[in-house]
Image (cartoon, rainbow, N blue to C red):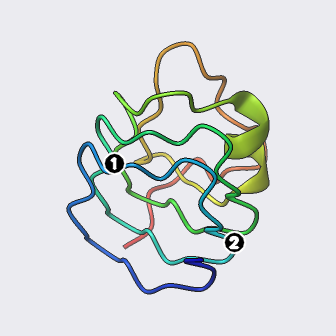
Amino acid sequence: DLAGARLRGADLRAVDLRGAWLMGADLRGADLRGADLVGADLRGADLRGADLSDALFVTGPQAAAARGDASTLLPARVPRPTHWTAVAAR
């Protein structure tokens, strides 16, 4: 259970987060490349500036449930949520 966890800037490359509860977690600037996110609950998670470009099993609904911005990197197959800000957070 990582709900509300403070993981800003964390190196989470290739970490197994299958089914993890990441609701409301601060993942700003985190490196999630290669992380397994199948079934992870990202509701309200802050992904601004995070790199999920090579994260495994990320879905559109997961991204849509989280917060992101122009600097959040998603896998090419995952659509960028329209409610994410078009400007990178500072």
Q: Are marks 1 and 2 in contact (CB under 8 Å)?
A: no
Residue occupying image coordinates x 78% and y 53%: 65
The C terminus, quarter of image: bottom left
Residue occupying image coordinates x 45% and y 29%: 56
| Kind of residue at disc 2 | Met
N-terminal-most mark, 1 or 2: 2
The N terminus, quarter of image: bottom right
Residue 29 in picture, x, y percent from top left: 32, 63
User: What label does residue 32 carry, if any?
Assistant: 1
User: What label does residue 63 carry, if any?
Assistant: none
| Element type at mark 2 | loop
Nearest the eye: 36 or 45:
36
Residue occupying image coordinates x 71% and y 57%: 41
| Kind of residue at disc 1 | Leu
How crowded is the residue under tag 1: few (<14 C-alpha within 10 Å), some, or many (20+)?
many
> Can you name the residue that lies furthest to the top here?
77
Residue 73's quadrant in the figure?
top left
| Element type at mark 1 | loop
Residue 54 in picture, x, y percent from top left: 34, 27
Residue 10 in picture, x, y percent from top left: 25, 69
Q: CA distance from mark 1 to mark 2?
A: 16 Å
User: What label does residue 23 carry, if any?
Assistant: 2
